[in-house]
Amino acid sequence: MLKGAAAWGGAALLPAWAQPGTQTEVVDDAGRRVALSLPLRRVVVFNRYTTEFVRALGAMDAVVGTDIDVARQARHARYWPSVTAAMFAGSSGMAPNYEAIVAMRPDAVLMPRNSDWARAATPLAPLGIAVVVVTAWDYLKHEFNVELLGRLFGHPKRAEALNAWFRGWRQRLGERVAGVPVADRPKVYFEEVGDWRSVLPGSGWHDMIEAAGGRNLFGDVRLGDESTTRGSVNNFFVDPEEVLTRRPDVLVKLQPGQYEPHPREFALEVLQRMAQRPALALLPAVRAQRLYHLSYYLAGGCSKITGALQLAQWLHPQRMRGLDPKQAMDEWLQRWQGMRVQRGYAWSLAELRA
């Protein structure tokens, strides 16, 4: 293991915050106080959502390393034109490549709350590389994390503009679903990529369901202490009979994806296969075709505000009349990511069959 300034070939190659000079203390998403020289000039970023926020703030020039979600998937090159294979810093925040990170000479490494950030900080701190916890997938802490990023990169006005945009959509959504009694909120069976794998309180998906005016079908399940596991205990495998017993009003199948939408045929196959499962085929919601396909990309856009709007449209079509979730997604793509508008991130079984 390389240690100290020798790993960098001398003090002149140390990260900016390790050089003599004024340091600023920030409080990150884990409540830690971290000393840094701001703005950051070279960073390694784990988690695509965080990288998207860095781009939204106009700071992609500072990104020298990323994880597998960005760097290794050549088919997403159009979405990440400035990212190369040489920027690969590890498969995820749970498996960083420390040698690669050190070679990139970053001022800091940005990692989400549900990563192995505590373990990563141990070998990197002696080398003068700060680990900063930033969680860009959290609907409830969106403004905190965006404001933090704005401060880290010296773009506070851009961060406030993004927060204002998020607040505007959140307020409009809240006004539409306000007043719906809890007992009348549709029960949502929200299934991750694996069959029978649902989401729990403490995950961003659970918060998204609630923001959309729904009830998580397994919202009463708690694994561990939520105050310490929020973001790490996200989902679990459920018993098919339990899903049948709880009788969801709506079923949503989450599928992995980035900027390129899934083909219509793929979405139809996924939903028809799900609808044909013996335990689900008996449900009134499935017979009524209240079964939906949702791409990770739309679901997670801008701390899941785009996903919450889409889900609310499915849960409360009358209340959402005149408020188009596609508009929010289009603005996220064009204004904040600099990308062309795409369609096909969300489908209902009824429209696919039609």
Image (cartoon, grey):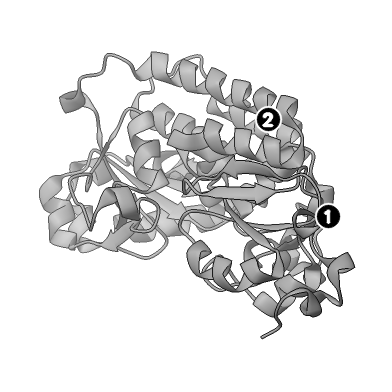
- Res. 84 visible in picture: yes
Pick whichever, 126 or 253, lies toward us.
126
Q: Residue at x 68, y 30 (%)?
A: 159
Element type at marker 2?
helix
Mark 1, Cα crowd under 10 Å, few <14 / some 14-19 / many 20+, is few
* Image spot of residue 334 (x, y percent): 74, 33
Kindly indicate the quadrant of the structure image that contains residue 284: top left
* Image spot of residue 189 (x, y percent): 28, 47
Reading the image, the residue beneath label 1 is 81
Reading the image, the residue beneath label 2 is 159
Up-down relation of residue 340 to residue 115 (above or below): above
- Nearer to us of marks 2 and 1 is 2
Mark closer to the chain start, 2 or 1: 1
Residue lying farthest to the right in this orientation: 12
Tell whether 313 sits left or right of 345: left
Pick whichever, 9 or 150, lies toward us.
9
Residue lying farthest to the left in this orientation: 245
Between marks 2 and 1, how big is the CA–CA gap?
A: 23 Å
Q: Which mark is residue 212?
A: none
Kindly indicate the quadrant of the structure image that contains residue 311: top left
* Image spot of residue 38 (x, y percent): 76, 43
Q: Amino acid at mark 2?
A: Ala
Q: Residue at x 18, y 53 (%)?
A: 243
* Image spot of residue 222 (x, y percent): 20, 52
Q: Residue at x 48, y 54 (%)?
A: 113
Q: Residue at x 32, y 42 (%)?
A: 289
Q: Amino acid at mark 1?
A: Pro
